[in-house]
Image: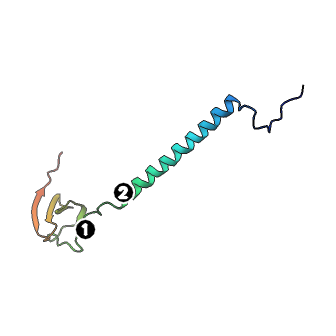
Amino acid sequence: MSDPDPTDPALPEPANLRFLRILVTTLTAVMICGLLVIVTLLVMRFSSDPVPQLPERVELPEGTRALAITAARDWYAIVTDDDRILIYDQASGALRQTLIVERGE
């Protein structure tokens, strides 16, 4: 009796090899789906509304210096070096409100 020819297509596939083939195919499909999700999330993130537009020039009270700025939909706030928060209207640029921050000791 002779050994079977390994290139014979009628020869059954070993169970370990079949499991490995299915595993590699599944992992490839999962990786492709993951890549598509990442690309979709990036496209959604970069096509969303841009950050609020800040004015080109802001008139601060005399003797103050801006330390930080934050923006919302219809206003923006500037934190100054003299412990105040100045809230300006986004459309007109007018000062809406001034908040004084008290220092905790």
Along the line of sight, which residue is nearer the eye, 53 or 46? 46
Splitting the image into 4 quarters, where does residue 8 fall? top right
Left or right, 2 with respect to 91, comes to right
Along the line of sight, which residue is nearer the eye, 38 or 103? 38
Query: Where residue 53 is drawn, which disc sits there?
Result: 1
Is residue 51 placed above or below 1 in the rendered structure?
A: below
Which residue lies at the image location 61% right of the left edge and 40% below the top edge? 24
Residue 12, percent across and down? 72, 31
Which amino acid type is marked by label 1?
A: Gln
Residue 61, percent across and down? 14, 69
Residue 28, percent across and down? 56, 44
Q: How is the image coloured?
A: rainbow
Query: Where residue 93 is drawn, which disc sits there?
Result: none
Left or right, 89 with respect to 23, comes to left
Which residue lies at the image location 16% right of the left edge and 63% below the top edge? 74
Left or right, 3 with respect to 92, comes to right
Number of marks in the rendered image: 2
**Seen from this angle, which residue lies furthest top?**
1
Crowding near the residue tagged with mark 1, few <14, some 14–19, many ≥20 C-alpha atoms within 10 Å = few
Give the position of the N terminus as an image quadrant: top right
SS state under label 2 = helix
